[in-house]
Amino acid sequence: MGEIEDGEADHITTDVQGQKCALVCECTAPESVNGKDNLPFLNAVLKNPVCKLYRFPTSDNKWMRIREQMSESILSFHIPKELISLHIKEDLCRNQELKELGELSPHWDNLRKNVLTHCDQMVNMYQDILTELSKETGSSFKSSSSKGEKTLEFVPVNLHLQRMHVHSPHLKDALYDVITVGAPAAHFQGFKNGGLRKLLHRFEMERRNTGYQFIYYSPENTAKAKEVLSNINQLQPLIATHADLLLNSASQHSPDSLKNSLKMLSEKTELFVHAFKDQLVRSALLALYTARPGGVLKKPPSPKNSTEESCPQDPPPPMRRQDSIPHHSDYDEEEWDRVWANVGKSLNCIIATVDKLIERDGGSEGGGDGSKDGEEDPSLVDSIITHPREDWYEQLYPLILTLKDCMGEVVNRAKQSLTFVLLQELAYSLPQCLMLTLRRDIVFSQALAGLVCGFIIKLHTSLHDPGFLQQLHTVGLIVQYEGLLSTYSDEIGMLEDMAVGISDLKKVAFKIIEAKSNDVLPVITGRREHYVVEVKLPARMFEALPLQIKEGQLLHVYPVLFNVGINEQQTLAERFGDVSLQESINQENFELLKEYYTIFMEKMPPDYISHFQEQNDLKGLLENLHQNIQAKKRKNVEIMWLAATICRKLNGIRFTCCKSAKDRTSMSVTLEQCSILRDEHQLHKDFFIRALDCMRSRQTQGALSESDDPETGCLTDNKPTSRHFYPVALLLVSSHLLVVWLILSLALLLAKYQ
């Protein structure tokens, strides 16, 4: 598992107590049993496969054949490069918006300059990292010995596919995939002050109690501001495009085309107007106004007559653009409401005009589904349509122009006010804020690379399963991470990083598109709060998908993490430390898993659910998992086995992680594989331990030299003191021996560093 060396033996067998049940042969080229692995789609993602063939006896004294394959993935480097490019683009756009905030009072202007200076430095750092990653042309995965390198910190450690193909004499052939990867963590940043879970909580508490010079916005409000800004940037060009299509339909005098164009324009404009139905925009406008030089809030004047707010009496000229926020004390708090409402009123005028045009032309009634007859001015419509045979284009053009101008005014005001909200987040504790953003980007990049790899492999494996495809677009996929980190020393920080990184994967959605060329590598779009991964499929595979997926429906994932420390450091943590972090993570993620199960039961068809219930008894497994989590038993590996079983039975994606995805990960994966052979494929009960020993044999795992440290992946002249010279199991027999061992270990460490 992990950094395995290519074996050179053509035929290896292991004699265990006189019974040969071991590795039959080893090869470096994948031998596809069903031909799927030879598809260019999968070969474009997986590289350098190492395959091993076994045979083991079944309970009825027949033989089952097992093919084990380990493959690297070029997504280890491709996804981080895609993501970093996206971050650079997003940050450059944000910096430009900060520059376009306009004139600010000296206090806020100095803060903005300071923020821009630091943000430009961060962009330069991201660009340097991207340049260095582009130079990487060697291995397609990052070894554990490189996990502390700054230029590779966005790349996951030891990302591999572990696949077991089982050919049983009586049962159907089966594939079992597990993605193994080092725990997503910022190793170069270090864990002296903890990981993301602790750092983010501490940062938010300090920011909440900040002084007078900043305006506090909750993380929810900050995320909302980013969401609205993203919606603005997406919807404004779409509305302009549909408005131009409406004019084109009018110039062609086509009633059907005109109605269709109006329907699309109405839908997008209503989404645009709905995006501003939030008190955050109003409060941000007032906050920005007070940050202007001489900004003094005054009592708002009485609202104007509603007839004055309706469409103008003549074909309206383009709206004169004003400053986004008034700089003087005559600021009207309700002005935003009028400007915002003008977009809807302009749309209503267009809808009414199209209705009249089609009606006068003898077209079908009800051309505008979204018409609000009580809000448009009938005198305007009648005055515009004085000549029925007049060119439709000429009658609609001034109304479209007014809609675009009103929309531009709203966008200008909203973008500046919401950018001011983002300035507050950046202005407080600048270096710490940006370093937290960097750390979160690093951890998320590692987690996302594994997720995309797992999603593509799962899609390829289950492409011809109608039930899976229906589950994919109806419910989404469960993604289960098995963590083996201890809650001791640096691994506490790693676990805190990993928990946040996996939780952030909820922001990711997948979209399957048809590949137009031989390039089938995925593409990432979006922003930090919402990512869309576009997975490309060859035309033949794409045509086999359900209509909903082919039409571009977003496919969601539900990541869950269950962690159980299993090494000697976890023994120390349970005896003398604190395991509350592990307990809280397991409890939180159990609730997420139960939520997914509830959605699954509600949305999937009854016949599909009944089949699941008959075969798997998922409810009983969930109850058993909950009991084991509540039991708080030491090193309760039953939690891992139950979570993995539930994931497999729900067609989920399985991950196994430890610090470097080597020792603990390989032990867990081989145990899981042998358990599957016993429970699902009738492995002879007397050969379970023998099969396990066979899979874990150094001959089959790639022998390490005596000076090779399996935890760090580095060659050293002597065994490091961190490997502990004494068997911990023996020391735990007596607490006195344990104390002696701790004292001796401390003395050795002091001697080493002196």
Image: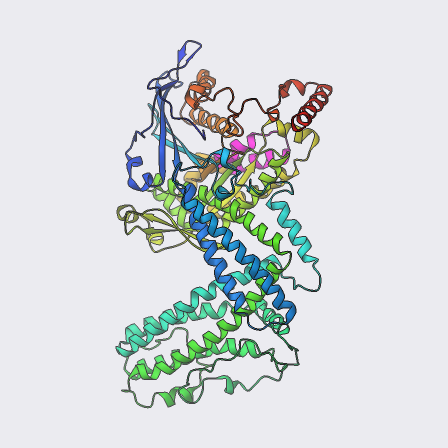
| Rendered image coloring scheme | rainbow
Which residue reaches farthest right? 736
Q: Is residue 277 left or right of residue 653?
A: right
Q: Which residues are magenta?
A: 619-646
In the rendered image, residue 693 lying in the magenta stretch gets the answer no
**Residue at position x 44%, y 79% from top?**
346
Q: Is residue 280 above or below residue 448?
A: below
Percent coordinates x, y for residue 728 in the rendering: 63, 21
In the rendered image, residue 624 lying in the magenta stretch gets the answer yes
- Residue 347 seen in the figure: no
Q: Is residue 742 above or below residue 73?
A: above
**Residue at position x 70%, y 24% from top?**
747
All told, the count of numbered labels is: 0
Which residue reaches farthest front? 754
The quarter in which the N terminus is drawn is top left
Q: Is residue 379 above or below residue 722?
A: below
The quarter in which the C terminus is drawn is top right
Q: Nearer the viewer, residue 537 or 267?
A: 537
- Residue 744 seen in the figure: yes
Q: Quadrant of residue 282?
A: bottom right
Percent coordinates x, y for residue 440 in the rendering: 55, 48
Percent coordinates x, y for residue 110 in the rendering: 62, 66
Q: Quadrant of residue 420?
A: bottom right
User: Looking at the magenta stretch, what is its main secondary structure?
Assistant: helix
Q: Nearer the viewer, residue 718 or 562?
A: 718
**Residue at position x 28%, y 52% from top?**
516
